[in-house]
């Protein structure tokens, strides 16, 4: 068991290193890096891999060069998109990733934005601060790390009980979200269908 | 010329204390003078005030039974400082337990029992004329070792004869959402076992619920709106709809008058009622007059529990009422006693399941407590007769029939105290935010739909986590021998920690949402908001004029 865990950690570390290399200049682009992830094994979505991607993007930004729009704006907007989307609180299935999920598209946008070269404001700017804020404030309530399914490494009653409680808390959150989505679907369906404007007889 | 008798009225004033305010306006109308002081446990400020004003009478409004010893300390401190004014107390608790109060607070001269306006006026007349006050009706006092209770005076037949409550000194004007308490009636015809309202008003005879005229109520609202800027009214009537068809017509007349006097859309109000009084057609008429929030006395979701409480209701009626209010977009909250003296594990489980069905969607916050046998209630009498009444007169208590439920209650109190009972707990904060999220008031910006949904989502999670924790604790205690639980509380401790940790997470999310609401407000206002001045339901968190 312990050897298996070590193997998993080593593989995870390896992938993180690949990713870091990719951003340091060449190698696999971010979406490909995601394809290496195995569902139900890696940490959940806003996991270490993703955090490191975002950190890398911010860390390697050359400061004080001209550019428009400000890098911070793009980074912040993307980060907010990513972290504000509650649907990503569970891993997307691998085929969704292959289909260039919204998340990958967002990361690609970030990469592209970086390659165009950004600049102002300085490295210790609002974007960094904001990103850390977002990750710590928003992510901590929607992320379970390690993944809920990864319970085999837990051996004591206390750990298992605690995991069960955590899973239940997540179920309650997801149930509530599902209910709200159902309500919105019902509300949209209940709206009267707008009749198409009648075409004038003389129209071609 | 005889100096006018002066009364210093002392009581809690977190919100407008209408009991004191009616007393003040009544004695002033009778030609006396009066001031109101907010009660504090520290007697020094009151001693200074008494030395300055030299009142003929000091009247204490004792609302909370458990506070009686604290009041006793303040009264003793006044006497120790040589205060010779006549000290009288009134309110629900001393009206019923006057013997205990007079015995345990030797500094007291008398107790005004039940409705106090006419009694206080007569007391002041006697004291001003230097006549014997011991003969006046509605009073109890000490005579040597004996406690004498004079006959009660009849209830005030026509509430319109009372002057409007004196609201001097209440700072509505500087509040961003000026909010006032108001009373449209006194009394309640229902006879719930845990409540002392009916015994309180029944004691003096007369109708079980007396209504002010709708015209008088709306005149008071109109005056407060036009002259004091009040836009939110909290009806403090014990049951605004009690009394069948006549009461419904009265409530609708109030709503219609609000509209016909031009206040429609400019004011909002909150009222309390039972779930079987939530009638869709009637609610729609009240909404037209500004109804925005309903407090329902749900109390139990267990059929047997409702029988024990003499509620004459079924859980299905609560559910139906909730659905009507939701469909009308009205926010509501409710009283709920998860445990009562006759609870069983089954009834508690039914109650938890009921909460999930009733407010699992987060429309309202699930807050819960246990029944307490307060003075004057039928449940106190019953427990006394069964030999189960424990504690003391100021803090009555009992044990459950199943000792394991005592363990459950102790654990529950520890796990949920902050959430359910503190001002900074999730229940209080979510309740206030929900109240505002459904407030539809001209001149105030509505909270947008997405944020309102997020608020209900957070409330649903708060309720869901609480129900899960309660269930887990209940299952564990039911299936585990008492000795084992007493020896090893680690499971329950971990469960409490889990509940508290989830509450912390939720609090962060609620704070984020609140901050976003505040930012929305900041962008819509030229001047920064002084949040200390906010009013609203308990406390306004977000709203500000456009």
Image (tube, rainbow, N blue to C red):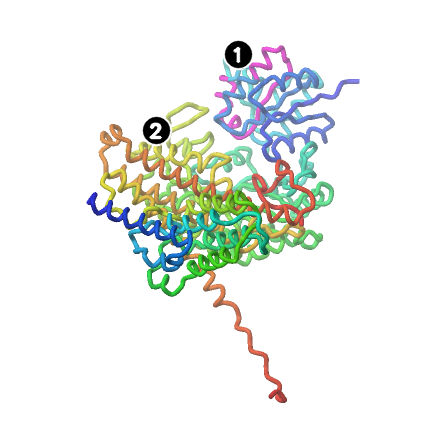
Query: Which mark sits nearer the N-terminus, 2 or 1?
Result: 1
Element on which disc 1 rests: loop
Look at the image and tell me whether residue B317 can be seen: no
Seen in the picture, residue B396 relative to B183 is either above or below; the reply is: above
Image check: A1 left or right of B491?
Answer: left
Q: Quadrant of residue B495?
A: top left
Image check: B314 left or right of B157?
Answer: left
Q: Position of residue A65 (x, y in %)?
A: 57, 51
Query: Pointer 1: what residue?
Result: B144
Front residue of B525 and B487 = B525
Q: Position of residue B315 (x, y in %)?
A: 39, 50
Front residue of B450 and B47 = B450
Seen in the picture, residue B109 relative to A180 is either above or below; the reply is: above
Q: Position of residue B93 (x, y in %)?
A: 51, 28
Front residue of B227 and A146 = A146
Magenta-tinted stretch? B75-104
Q: Position of residue B472 (x, y in %)?
A: 31, 42
Magenta stretch secondary structure, dominant? helix
- Residue at the (60%, 19%) spot, across then down: B87
Q: Are the residues under marks 2 and 1 on the same chain? A: yes
Mark 2 surroundings within 10 Å by alpha-carbon count, few (fewer than 14), some (14 through 19), many (20 or more): some
Most extreme residue toward the front is A25
Query: Pointer 2: what residue?
Result: B388
């Amino acid at each position: 068991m312990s050897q298996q865990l070590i193997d998993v950690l080593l593989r995870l570390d390896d992938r993180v290193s690949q990713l870091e290399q990719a951003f340091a200049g060449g190698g696999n682009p971010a979406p490909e890096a995601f394809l290496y992830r195995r569902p139900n094994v890696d940490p959940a979505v806003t996991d270490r891999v993703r955090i490191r991607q975002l950190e890398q993007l911010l860390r390697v930004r050359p400061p004080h060069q001209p550019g428009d729009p400000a890098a911070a704006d793009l980074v912040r907007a993307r980060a907010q998109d990513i972290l504000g989307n509650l649907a990503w609180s569970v891993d997307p299935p691998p085929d969704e990733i292959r289909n260039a999920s919204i998340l990958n598209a967002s990361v690609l946008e970030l990469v592209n934005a970086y390659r165009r070269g950004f600049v102002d404001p300085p490295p210790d700017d609002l974007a960094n601060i904001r990103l850390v804020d977002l990750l710590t404030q928003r992510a901590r309530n929607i992320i379970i790390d390690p993944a809920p399914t990864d319970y085999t490494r837990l051996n004591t009653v206390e750990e298992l009980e605690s995991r069960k409680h955590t899973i239940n808390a997540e179920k309650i959150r997801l149930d509530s979200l599902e209910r709200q989505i159902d309500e919105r679907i019902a509300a949209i369906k209940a709206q009267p269908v707008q009749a198409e404007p009648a075409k004038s007889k003389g129209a071609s | 010329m005889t100096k006018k008798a002066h009364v210093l009225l002392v009581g809690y004033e977190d919100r407008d204390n209408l009991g004191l305010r009616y007393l003040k306006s009544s004695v002033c109308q009778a030609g006396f003078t009066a001031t109101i002081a907010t009660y504090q446990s520290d007697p020094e400020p009151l001693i200074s005030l008494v030395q300055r004003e030299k009142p003929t009478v000091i009247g204490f409004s004792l609302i909370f039974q458990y506070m009686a010893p604290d009041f006793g300390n303040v009264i003793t401190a006044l006497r120790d400082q040589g205060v010779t004014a006549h000290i009288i107390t009134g309110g629900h608790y001393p009206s019923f337990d006057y013997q205990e109060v007079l015995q345990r607070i030797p500094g007291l001269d008398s107790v005004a029992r039940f409705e106090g306006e006419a009694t206080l006026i007569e007391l002041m007349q006697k004291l001003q004329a230097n006549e014997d006050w011991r003969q006046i009706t509605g009073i109890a006092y000490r005579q040597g070792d004996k406690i004498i209770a004079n006959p009660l005076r009849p209830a005030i037949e026509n509430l319109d004869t009372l002057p409007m409550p004196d609201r001097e000194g209440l700072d509505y004007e500087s509040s961003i959402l000026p909010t006032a308490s108001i009373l449209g009636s006194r009394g309640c015809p229902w006879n719930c076992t845990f409540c002392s309202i009916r015994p309180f008003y029944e004691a003096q005879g007369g109708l079980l619920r007396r209504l002010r005229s709708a015209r008088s109520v709306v005149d008071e609202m109109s005056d407060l709106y036009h002259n004091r800027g009040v836009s939110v009214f909290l009806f403090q009537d014990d049951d605004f709809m009690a009394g069948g068809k006549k009461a419904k017509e009265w409530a609708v007349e109030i709503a219609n008058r609000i509209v016909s006097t031009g206040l429609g859309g400019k004011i909002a109000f909150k009222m309390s009622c039972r779930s079987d009084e939530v009638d869709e057609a009637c609610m729609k008429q009240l909404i037209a007059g500004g109804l925005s929030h309903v407090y329902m006395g749900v109390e139990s979701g267990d059929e047997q529990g409702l029988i024990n409480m003499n509620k004459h209701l079924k859980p299905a009626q609560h559910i139906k009422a909730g659905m009507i209010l939701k469909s009308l977009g009205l926010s509501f909250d409710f009283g709920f006693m998860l445990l009562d003296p006759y609870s069983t594990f089954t009834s508690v489980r039914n109650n938890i399941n009921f909460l999930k069905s009733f407010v699992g969607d987060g429309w309202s916050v699930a807050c819960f407590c246990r029944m307490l046998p307060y003075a004057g209630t039928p449940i106190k009498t019953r427990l006394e007769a069964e030999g189960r009444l424990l504690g003391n007169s100021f803090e009555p208590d009992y044990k459950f029939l199943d000792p394991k439920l005592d363990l459950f209650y102790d654990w529950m109190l520890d796990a949920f105290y902050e959430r359910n009972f503190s001002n900074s707990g999730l229940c209080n904060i979510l309740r206030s935010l929900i109240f505002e999220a459904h407030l539809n008031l001209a001149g105030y910006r509505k909270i947008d739909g997405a944020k309102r949904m997020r608020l209900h989502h957070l409330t649903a999670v708060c309720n869901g986590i609480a129900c899960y924790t309660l269930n887990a604790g209940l299952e564990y205690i039911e299936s585990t021998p008492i000795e084992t639980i007493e020896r090893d509380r680690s499971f329950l401790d971990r469960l409490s920690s889990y509940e508290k940790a989830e509450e912390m997470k939720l609090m962060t999310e609620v704070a984020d949402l609140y901050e976003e609401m505040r930012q929305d407000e900041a962008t819509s206002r030229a001047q920064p908001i002084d949040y200390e001045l906010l009013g609203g339901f308990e406390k306004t968190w977000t709203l500000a004029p456009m």
